[in-house]
Amino acid sequence: MNSLQYAFGATTPSCTLQPQRYCTAIAHKQLGRHTIPLGTCTLRRTLPPGTYLGGKNALRVSCMMEQALAKAGVVKKEQPAPTFTEDSVDQPQKKTLPLLIVFDLDNTLWTPELYQLRLPSSRAPIAGKDVQLFPEAAAILQELAEGGEWTASGTRVAIASRTHKKAWAENLLQQFEIVPGMTLHELICNNGKGGLIEIRTGSKLDHFRRLQKASGVEYEDMLFFDDAFGGKYGNCEPVARELGVLSAHCPKGLNFSIWDAALDAFAAARTSGERYRHHAVVSEKHGVKQVGAENREKKTGANGSGNEGRVKMWNEEKGYGFIESPSSDGDVFAHRSVLAGGLESEDMVSGLAVRFHIGTDAKTGRRCATSVEPAEGISKASGQQAPRRWSTDDPQTGTEDADSLDMPCLSLCQPFATLILNGVKTIETRNNPELLKPYAGQEVMIRIGMRDWPDDKGWRRQMEAAGYSKEDMERLSKPPPSVKKGDIAGVVRLGKTMPNSQLARVIPGGWPSVEQGVCASKEDMMKYSTPIETATWLEKPLRAKGNFAGVWFQNIPASSLENSKDAK
């Protein structure tokens, strides 16, 4: 695109750039001793003073500049653009970025709010005519669409909009073009990977719970932008207080100032490792404001780390339960939405040691846990007991017992436990990337679970594709006669955990090989793969209770491992 130059006959207005991260391009003309500004536009580049506004920079400013200059009666003429290279641009320093950026729509990305439109019932609003993106919001969306550091960090974009004009909003997402060939809807859908769009009436807390479930991203890895702070119809304050999603208040639409401040606050909170710092709202007026601090300070230990207790009961189907603790004056209600530190609903079994903070439910006024994390002795990243070396100490005497080993164990549904130990299933997938990551290169015991996997067809299709006959499927999916459900039946050595897509790039055969190794289709498998490097049966199975959270440690006779047999 040719650069744009403007002239007042013999007088030429100039463009000056402030040497800041987000620079202001100012078109002005000199009349006597006075400099008369004609228009300004914020530029998302760090450029040296005097840098010519040509090439792709003109794309950022031309529209607003043309409008301002036209009002001043400036005549535009085309000139060849001088050479411009990205080498002249000072790139911002890399820092921790959110994995999911969630935007409100009305009065945040675009204006006016849809309920304010007065259109015939037969006509939907037209992007750019009835509804416009805020200029700086459009530039921010353009940056996200261009990728770069956002692609490298795996950042995705989501929408959480509370409106009764759902059809209009969805239609506008399809109309607004962020960069040539990419609409706002396509940006959110992340090139076909599935859109994270919550447009509905009701509480935004529910919006976020659905987004968290759909994306698998922890609340502390999200960043939220909305024009409503608090009160009856507020969004930023309740989302930050109840869920721990760092929120940014942009009452006059998304702009670079609040965008920058929110990213800086997110990086500081994430780097600190202090979860309470995500219970905050960023605004131009108040800076970073902690919300619900009085609830987090209530009944915490002297070091501010919260209460320690154990799960008393947990209903996994409904996603809630109770935690008991001597310091909490009775059992404390907890919902799955407040689980953090890698904990998942399926991990919350009776007796699990946790650390939690107590607050008050905004709707009911009932006392409840506002965050639940693994207690000491459990890996914070994974929510499971931290990996440890095999122990040969007798717990009763404290003396070395060469016949005993303390081994990590994992319980699996049938037929997958048997398929693993028979060498058919060579990849285990989980939604929690930290569950098996600590055990890379280690041996883990496999327990035959008490229940069967409900889908009996998916794994058979993959085995058939791999060339197994029906007779092979029956033989390899059943354990030896001596092995019963509830037995620790074998031992495996785990490889490195990685995203499924990454494994598909490095494994011979690509995705078909991954599907056959997992014994599930690409759509049915979980998000993170852990290769199984070796698998062996124990000569004699060991009975073990299976009410454990993820990976647990079991005392195993050393002779059991010495007499193990290779997978068939």
Image (cartoon, grey):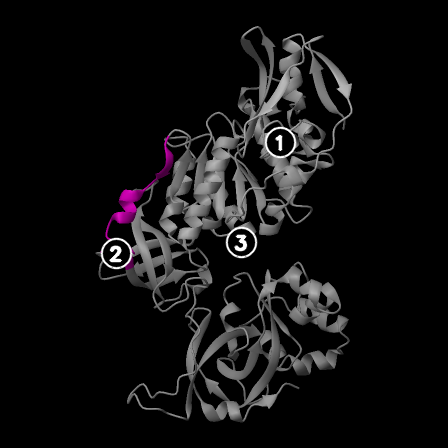
Q: Earlier in the sequence, mark 1 or mark 2?
A: 1
Question: For the residues marked 1 and 2, what is the alpha-carbon distance in whole angstroms?
Answer: 50 Å
Tell me the residue that label 1 is attached to: 167
Question: For the residues marked 3 and 2, what is the alpha-carbon distance in whole angstroms?
Answer: 31 Å
Q: Nearer the viewer, mark 3 or mark 2?
A: 2
Residue 119 picture location, percent across and down: 62, 18
In the image, 192 versus 253, the foreground residue is: 253
User: Is 526 situated above or below 211?
Assistant: below
Residue 310 picture location, percent across and down: 32, 64
In the image, 63 versus 561, the foreground residue is: 63
The residue positioned farthest toward the front in the image shown: 33
In the image, 229 versus 490, the foreground residue is: 229
Q: Nearer the viewer, mark 1 or mark 2?
A: 2
Tell me the residue that label 2 is attached to: 303
* Element marked by disc 1: helix
* Element marked by disc 2: loop
Residue 216's tag is 3
Residue 402 picture location, percent across and down: 40, 93
Verify whether residue 417 appears in magenta.
no
Q: Earlier in the sequence, mark 1 or mark 3?
A: 1
**Residue type highlighted by circle 3:** Gly
The residue at 38%/59% (across/down) is 373
Quarter occupied by the C terminus? bottom right
The residue at 38%/51% (across/down) is 275
**Residue type highlighted by circle 2:** Asn
Q: Earlier in the sequence, mark 3 or mark 2?
A: 3
Residue 414 picture location, percent across and down: 58, 75
In the image, 518 versus 70, the foreground residue is: 70
* Element marked by disc 3: loop
What's drawn in magenta, residue-wise?
A: 286-307
